[in-house]
Image: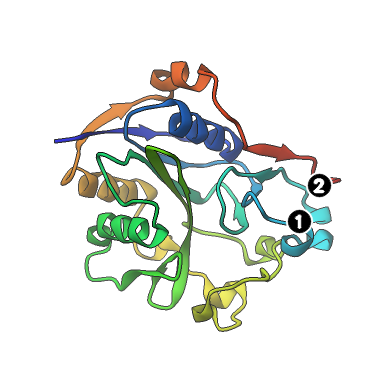
Amino acid sequence: MTNINVLALENIPIYEQLQLEEALLRAGDENYCIINHKSPPAIVMGISGKREELIDEVHFAKRPIPIIRRFSGGGCVLINPETLFLTFICNRHDVDIGTCPKRLLGWTEEILKPCFQEKAFHVQANDYAIGDKKFGGNAQYFAKNRWLHHTSILWNYSVDEMRVLKMPPKVPEYRQGRSHSDFLICLNQYFTSKEQFFGKVVASLANRFQIVWQQKSDVETIVQTPHRKATELLDPLRN
C-alpha cells in the first residue's frame, strides 16, 4: 500500500502553511496530507486575484489583517482561528488524475464522502457543499509529476467579519445571488469537534494509503531545499 505522510499542524499561520505546501509540492517527492487549524486572521487571494474586486476597503480599514497571495488559483478566503485547512499533495504515479481539476475534485469527494455518512455532502461546482450551501473552498495546482489540492473549511465564522469580502466578480451558478450568510454553512453543526472531523478524514485515507504520521520538523530539510516560491505576503496598505 502506498504511503501518505500526515502532518497535523496547529496554530500555524496560513502564510507559513502555504510556504510549507509550496516546498513540499516543488521540492518533495512523497505524498502528503496536511491538516491545520487555529491560524490567526488573514485574507488569502488566488494568484490572479485583484484586491479592488475582492476586498471591501471600508470594512478592511476597521480590522486590518495580513493579505496573502497564494501560489494557486481560485477565489478569495477570509481566515480566522476557526478555519480548518486540509491539503493533499500527491505524486501522479500514485494518484493519477491527469491535469483535470474535475477528476481531482472527484477523487477528494470520494475521500471525504465517508466522513459525512448520511449527510448530503457533495462537490458543487468547485466547492464542498452540504445540500446547496458551501462549507469549503478549493484550489488546485498541477506540476509536472505532482499535484496539490488545498481546502479552507468553515468550522465557524463571524457574519460581521465576513463583510470584508465583496461579492466576487465570478460566482458559481448555484449561489443564485445569495449573501455570505445565506450561502455559507458551518461544519460545527455536523461534527462534535474539529478533531472528530480530522480523525474521520485520516480514517478514510487509511483505506487507500498507509498512514505515516509526521511533525513539521520532519520536513524542515525539504522546506530549506531551493525551489520556486510564488506565495507572497502583500503590503496591506498598498497592494
Above or below, 217 relative to 172: above
Query: What's the residue at 26%, 62% (across, down)?
Result: 113
Write down the residue under mark 2.
Answer: 239
Kind of residue at disc 2: Asn
Residue 14: x percent and y percent? Answer: 57, 40
Is 194 situated left or right of 70 in this image? left
Q: Earlier in the sequence, mark 2 or mark 1?
A: 1
Judging from the image, what secondary structure is the residue with disc 2 in?
loop
Residue 133: x percent and y percent? Answer: 46, 74
Q: Is residue 12 among what the camera can see?
A: no
Judging from the image, what secondary structure is the residue with disc 1 in?
helix
Residue 227: x percent and y percent? Answer: 54, 25
Kind of residue at disc 1: Arg
Is 55 situated left or right of 185 in this image? right
Q: Are marks 2 and 1 in contact (CB under 8 Å)?
A: yes
Above or below, 90 relative to 51: above
Q: Is residue 224 among what the camera can see?
A: yes
Above or below, 166 relative to 175: above
Task: Pick whichever, 29 or 115, lies toward us.
Answer: 29
Write down the residue under mark 1.
Answer: 51
Query: What's the residue at 42%, 44% (across, down)?
Result: 148
